[in-house]
Amino acid sequence: MEELGVKRRIVLVPVPAQGHVTPIMQLGKALYSKGFSITVVLTQYNRVSSSKDFSDFHFLTIPGSLTESDLKNLGPFKFLFKLNQICEASFKQCIGQLLQEQGNDIACVVYDEYMYFSQAAVKEFQLPSVLFSTTSATAFVCRSVLSRVNAESFLLDMKDPKVSDKEFPGLHPLRYKDLPTSAFGPLESILKVYSETVNIRTASAVIINSTSCLESSSLAWLQKQLQVPVYPIGPLHIAASAPSSLLEEDRSCLEWLNKQKIGSVIYISLGSLALMETKDMLEMAWGLRNSNQPFLWVIRPGSIPGSEWTESLPEEFSRLVSERGYIVKWAPQIEVLRHPAVGGFWSHCGWNSTLESIGEGVPMICRPFTGDQKVNARYLERVWRIGVQLEGELDKGTVERAVERLIMDEEGAEMRKRVINLKEKLQASVKSRGSSFSSIDNFVNSLKMMNFM
Ligand code: UDP
């Protein structure tokens, strides 16, 4: 940063989970390219790699005693709650020390919305802070709405199929059942965390990994409600790609893809947290096999409850996938989606996977597992019309039909046209004069204005 007297250091506070680490590190890269120095503050439960790709970043670890087994025992929501309690004091101390060492040179703290403990330190040292949302703008809107509902009566509504199938007032086309409730904990603790995450407290801006061509009305809603600038700067994986995979990628699948016909393969991945039941995996395997299409399936270790990897699956499963399937533990997802052999993406519809699929022009089979994935799946099917959502019990006939609709039918060809059109819009938005490109410039300019020493 050339200007004399402008503060240069940006402190990033990521959530230690793949879907959150990836976009915040990409944001770090984007800000680094604008001349800022980047410090990443990690908790001791550290899932962020300080690999060679980030050798220009500075990493700090604050004390905090939560472990992998705490995550297993508490579940993600209680874990986050506790992490926020534990880290508040140590983060204050860390920022105090950093300010001393850096001669007050902190331009702002950018914290993941789930790491809201950051606000106490920011307040104490009167630093500018920015809330970073790694989900879609629509999911943020939903969390704001949910944080205000009465948990008891909402639970009753959700149990009544006549209500849960209805559209939620003001959130067209989302139904009650599409709202981001979670399989990872009781509604009350989820709503408690949501009311913390949507409370922007003293944050002077909100950055969202999205773009106006995907979510203009949700972004406008947030802009109006939050009363601080909202900067949609995504998709970050196109604007500032930065490899940050926490698991080792098996690149042999690219060789396998090279041998498949163009547009024929269904790529299946459920992200870094979703779990699969053996019963559903068998229905999927049958349906995929009956569809006669080749498929590349990521089965993450630990994603089948009670099993290290696939050892608990019956023999029938291996027989079904052996003909046309290829299984890996973790794939180089963006390269896979970019491969010409891939014709469709069976996804849990995490926000990163959604953006990556649109970014490569690949239509989707949507099978959300929990939380904001349900919101994204509904948007994929009903708003952008580039996906087929599978709802209710999985059965092999429905799976086979969904693959046919996507790969063989005219309907799939129409979806492909629409997703390619969106892909072009996404690419334009991060190029010079595009909306996300301008948004990040506006954010950087606002920081400069705030930060003359
Ligand atoms: N991913 C990957 N290889 C895989 C599966 C997933 O690199 O085999 C990456 C994917 O590209 C995405 C992230 O993991 O960036 C998953 O994030 P998402 O928001 O889609 O889902 P989450 O893991 O948070 O549920």
Image (cartoon, helix red, strand yellow):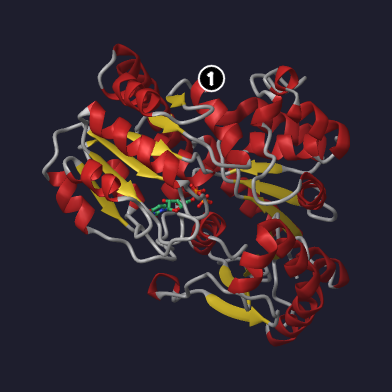
What amino acid does circle 1 point to?
Arg
Nearer to me, 170 or 324: 324
Residue 77 at x, y percent in the picture: 71, 56
Name the image quarter holding the C terminus: bottom right
Residue 164 at x, y percent in the picture: 71, 24
Q: Is residue 40 visible?
A: no
Name the image quarter holding the N terminus: bottom right
| 423 relative position to 440: left or right | left
Nearer to me, 169 or 21: 169
- Residue that appears at 69% across and 80% down: 65
Which secondary structure lies at badge 1? helix
Above or below residue 154? Residue 190 is: below
Q: Residue furthest top?
A: 410
- Residue that appears at 47% across and 47% down: 276
Residue 107 at x, y percent in the picture: 69, 66
| 386 relative position to 298: left or right | right
Nearer to me, 437 or 339: 339
Above or below residue 372? Residue 241 is: below
- Residue corresponding to mark 1: 382
Identify the image quadrant of residue 371. Answer: top right
Give the total of numbered labels.
1
| 47 relative position to 188: left or right | left
Q: Residue furthest left?
A: 259
